[in-house]
């Protein structure tokens, strides 16, 4: 997709001198859970090194130990060939280690300058430190091309720039080893490309980069070496040039996985749901949806791409009846839903609309409830709960067992509270509940957020199967790969508007990326 | 009303606002660091008792002040131990401190002085006396400025001046020093402070120590400068009003000062209006006049003056994520 012909060689520092990071037999347990089991890791200086693994494989724990958030139970750390004891973040910073966390550690109402200087203020009075930091920011901007306005307030900046501030913060503290934890999760494809350019620039300056990710495409594109973790253990180390995506996926999961879901072609049927000119304003009168129109056809998946927070959540909530329609209308069969004829999720469910919410913790599940109770939420008036008005524990149990078997939900214990399942299994539980009544329309939000590779292919296959069965599906995802893999048509949302729509055959990765970023003129495919 | 009358009302307002200003600054420092400080009232009361008791026993107002600060800082540390070290619920801990102070001051006072919960009336030497600023005599004959200097600016006790100085001092500390930058950061995003290699715990404890000192001074003012001895429940909700002023002032020192002065002025005005017939309505019952400041508090806090955005991490103990 992105055939850049940039030099992939690490800088000279890699070829001489001791490794930047050397971890030996690091073990860390949290209660009964062994997060890291005798992990070894060697990273050559001046390289970009990927650490990959599924959720819970222990990659975050390894780097947290390196950055001093946790202390290892046993094992040793060497930085640039010297034994190092790192018990808190201050130790790590002193050793030249910097970290950019998955969730930014920025004070939202502080300026860039204040955030960058926080923790390295140069003395008790701020005046001197501010001047010095301003100068330093200018130098870093010149040297690495990291431009940012020092006086801008963080919360007004786009996430891509916020991330740049995080990197500047680490560099300002003198970081020569930079740890990046899932850095591209919040970026548009275009921002990701620019971000990788920055990483290559850092490498050229001799900075060692540790990239924690689960996105194999990115590992292949930007890293020099890669380490794979599985269930707390280090499985293998590879030179990136000597491996493939497929091989890495297999190493991560421990068995062969299909990275691409086989597409099933069915002729699309009649219009199942139509939204016309939906406009929706939030509490402060800000329009979150602007004049949104779309159609869902039976046997077709419409993928809705966009950076998180551009109105997709609001659209899903309006379509699923959680928030009332303000302007415009939604048409499902003979039923016209508008401001004067509102609806609610129960009515929509009766009309055959199923909704897989974006946030399974907030909307999809009641975490402290048992799996079997969660398995009937919203459908509790149906026959799965037993006869009459009382809930029958036996019926619940049986129903849940059936779902667990069919959707491969583990552990197969209907009495376990929803909080006790992994993210992937929680998601499967929600999917199972919504798919089981065989809806004719499905609204699916972020179906694989925080789900591991094995779970992703399973969920994708289920969605594809529903489509084959003639269901009209709206798929909202911030993962462009997912949209591309499943959709028949692709619409792009930016700032509450649908800025373009195209068929899968004509879809171009780069162009969609630009539309997601709101670059004008990119959306001519509408 | 003459010019002098106005000055006297303002003068009284300043004195009434003093404990509010000190407590509100204490609350501001604490809440900017992310710790809800509903225990201002208890610290104020404990400070008032300690000041009066020690001043009686030692004969020194300054020893009383030290005791007030010590007792108030002690309660602050109890709050810190519960809320920072043990990540307890901050409001509950604060209320516990208020209840503790309310009971303990009376018990200790009965045990020490056998006067039904009061301390003996303090002599002149055992109290803070008003001090005259230089220039009162020289300016005495200057119209407007002379009376202004004499009646309003000069002639207050030390704690009043400390309260006034505390505002620019706190502002400077928060916005012009490293400590202040970190303190504000820890109230917004403690994880950022932790990842910068700075101790969240120690920063928050320091904020509480400063809050304790300020509340102690406020307490000493009540019993050894404004009053002449401790009376049970003499804080009379001033800690809560200070908290209200702090929220009304949106956690910003100068706005908080303005809010405290407003509350002080309302109270002084109410005192002044007692027994004075007003045009049209005539004489107002004293009870109505006395509730005015509290009615104003309710109205002001009902959100008439824009949304107050508290520090983001306020009330949440810091836990490292797993």
Image: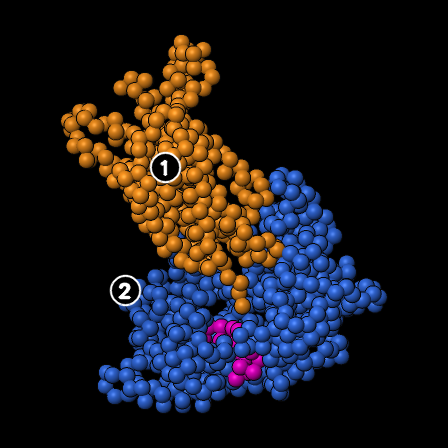
Q: Is residue B248 visible?
A: no
Q: Nearer the viewer, residue A414 or B161?
A: B161
Name the spot of residue A51 as percent of width and height, x first: 66, 72
Which chain does the numbered disc 2 sit on? A
Residue under the point 75% across and 76% down: A239
| Residue A70 within the magenta-colored segment of the rendering | no
- Magenta region, residue range: A444-458
Q: Position of residue A334 (x, y in %)?
A: 31, 76
Within 10 angstroms of label 1, few (less than 14), some, or many (20 or more) residues?
A: many
Q: Which chain is blue?
A: A
Which of B209 and B7 lies nearest the eye of the viewer? Answer: B209
The residue that mark 2 highlights is A340
Q: Secondary structure at mark 1?
A: helix
Label 2 residue SS? loop
| Picture quadrant where residue A221 is located | bottom right
- Whole-percent x and y of residue A29? 58, 74
Q: Colour of chain B?
A: orange
Establish if B182 lies above or below A321.
above
**Residue A456 inside the magenta-drawn segment:** yes
Quarter location, residue A372: bottom left
On the same chain, marks 1 and 2? The answer is no
Q: Which residue is mark 1?
A: B53
């Amino acid at each position: 997709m992105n055939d850049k012909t940039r030099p992939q060689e690490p800088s000279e520092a890699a070829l001489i001198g001791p490794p930047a990071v050397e971890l030996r037999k690091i073990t860390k347990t949290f209660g009964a859970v062994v997060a890291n089991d005798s992990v070894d890791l060697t990273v050559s200086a001046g390289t970009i090194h990927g650490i990959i693994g599924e959720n819970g494989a222990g990659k975050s724990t390894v780097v947290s130990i390196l950055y001093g958030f946790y202390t290892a139970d046993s094992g040793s750390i060497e930085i640039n060939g010297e034994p190092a004891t790192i018990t808190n973040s201050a130790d790590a910073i002193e050793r030249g280690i910097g970290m950019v966390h998955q969730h930014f550690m920025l004070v939202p109402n502080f300026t860039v300058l204040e955030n960058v200087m926080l923790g390295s203020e140069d003395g008790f009075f701020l005046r001197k430190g501010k001047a010095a930091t301003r100068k330093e920011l200018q130098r870093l901007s010149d040297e690495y091309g990291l431009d940012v306005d020092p006086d801008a307030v963080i919360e007004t900046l786009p996430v891509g720039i916020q991330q740049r501030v995080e990197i500047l913060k680490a560099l300002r503290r003198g970081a020569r080893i930079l740890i990046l934890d899932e850095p591209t999760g919040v970026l548009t494809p275009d921002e990701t490309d620019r971000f990788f350019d920055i990483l290559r620039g850092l490498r050229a300056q001799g900075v060692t980069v540790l990239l924690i990710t689960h996105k194999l495409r990115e590992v292949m594109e930007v890293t020099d070496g890669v380490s794979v973790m599985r269930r707390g253990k280090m499985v293998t180390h590879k030179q990136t040039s000597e491996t493939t995506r497929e091989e890495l996926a297999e190493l991560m999961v421990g068995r062969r996985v299909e990275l691409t879901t086989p597409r099933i072609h069915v002729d699309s049927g009649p219009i199942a749901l139509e939204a016309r000119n939906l406009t929706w304003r939030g509490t402060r009168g800000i329009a979150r949806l602007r004049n949104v129109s779309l159609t869902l056809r039976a046997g077709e998946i419409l993928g809705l791409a966009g950076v998180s927070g551009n109105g997709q959540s609001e659209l899903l909530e309006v379509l699923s009846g959680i928030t009332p329609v303000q302007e415009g209308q939604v048409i499902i069969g003979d039923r016209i839903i508008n401001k004067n004829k509102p609806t609610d999720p129960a009515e929509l469910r009766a009309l055959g609309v199923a909704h897989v919410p974006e946030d399974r913790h907030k909307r999809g599940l009641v975490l402290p409830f048992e799996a079997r109770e969660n398995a009937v939420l919203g459908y509790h008036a149906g026959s799965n709960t037993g006869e009459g008005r009382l809930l029958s524990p036996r019926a619940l149990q049986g129903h849940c067992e059936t779902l667990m078997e069919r959707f491969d939900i583990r552990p197969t214990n209907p009495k376990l509270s929803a909080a006790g399942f992994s993210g992937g299994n929680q998601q499967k539980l929600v999917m199972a509940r919504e798919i089981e009544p065989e809806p004719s329309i499905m609204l699916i939000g972020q179906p694989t957020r925080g789900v591991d590779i094995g779970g992703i292919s399973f969920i994708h296959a289920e969605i594809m199967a529903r489509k084959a069965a003639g269901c009209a599906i709206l798929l909202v995802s911030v993962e462009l790969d997912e949209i591309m893999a499943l959709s028949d048509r692709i619409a792009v949302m930016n700032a509450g508007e649908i800025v373009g729509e195209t068929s899968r055959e004509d879809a171009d990765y780069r162009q969609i990326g630009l539309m997601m970023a709101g670059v004008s003129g990119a959306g001519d495919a509408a | 009303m003459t010019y002098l009358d106005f000055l006297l009302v303002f003068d009284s307002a300043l004195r009434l606002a003093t404990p509010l200003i000190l407590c509100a600054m204490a609350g501001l420092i604490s809440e900017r660091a992310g710790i809800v400080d509903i225990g201002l009232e208890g610290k104020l009361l404990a400070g008032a008792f300690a000041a009066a008791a020690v001043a009686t026993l030692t004969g020194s107002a300054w020893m009383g002040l030290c005791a007030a600060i010590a007792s108030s800082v002690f309660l602050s540390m109890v709050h810190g131990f519960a809320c920072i070290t043990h990540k307890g619920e901050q409001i509950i801990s604060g209320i516990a401190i208020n209840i503790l102070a309310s009971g303990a001051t009376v018990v200790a006072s009965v045990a020490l002085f056998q006067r039904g919960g009061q301390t003996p009336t303090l002599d002149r030497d055992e109290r803070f006396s008003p001090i005259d600023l230089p220039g009162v005599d020289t300016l005495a004959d200057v119209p407007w400025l002379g009376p202004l200097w004499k009646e309003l600016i000069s002639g207050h006790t030390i704690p009043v001046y400390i309260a006034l100085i505390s505002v620019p001092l706190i502002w400077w500390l928060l916005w012009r020093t490293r400590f202040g930058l970190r303190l504000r950061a820890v109230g917004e995003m403690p994880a950022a402070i932790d990842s910068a290699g700075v101790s969240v715990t120690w920063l928050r404890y320091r904020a509480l120590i400063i809050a304790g000192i300020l509340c102690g001074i406020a307490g000493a003012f009540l019993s050894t400068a404004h009053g002449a001895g401790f009376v049970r429940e003499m804080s009379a909700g001033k800690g809560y009003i200070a908290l209200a002023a702090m929220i009304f002032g949106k956690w910003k020192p100068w706005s908080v000062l303005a809010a405290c002065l407003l509350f002080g002025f309302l109270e002084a005005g109410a005192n002044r209006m007692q027994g004075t017939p007003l045009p049209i309505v005539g004489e107002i019952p004293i009870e109505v006049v006395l509730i005015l400041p509290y009615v104003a508090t309710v109205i002001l806090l009902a959100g008439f003056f824009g949304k107050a955005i508290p520090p983001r991490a306020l009330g949440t103990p810091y836990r490292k994520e797993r």
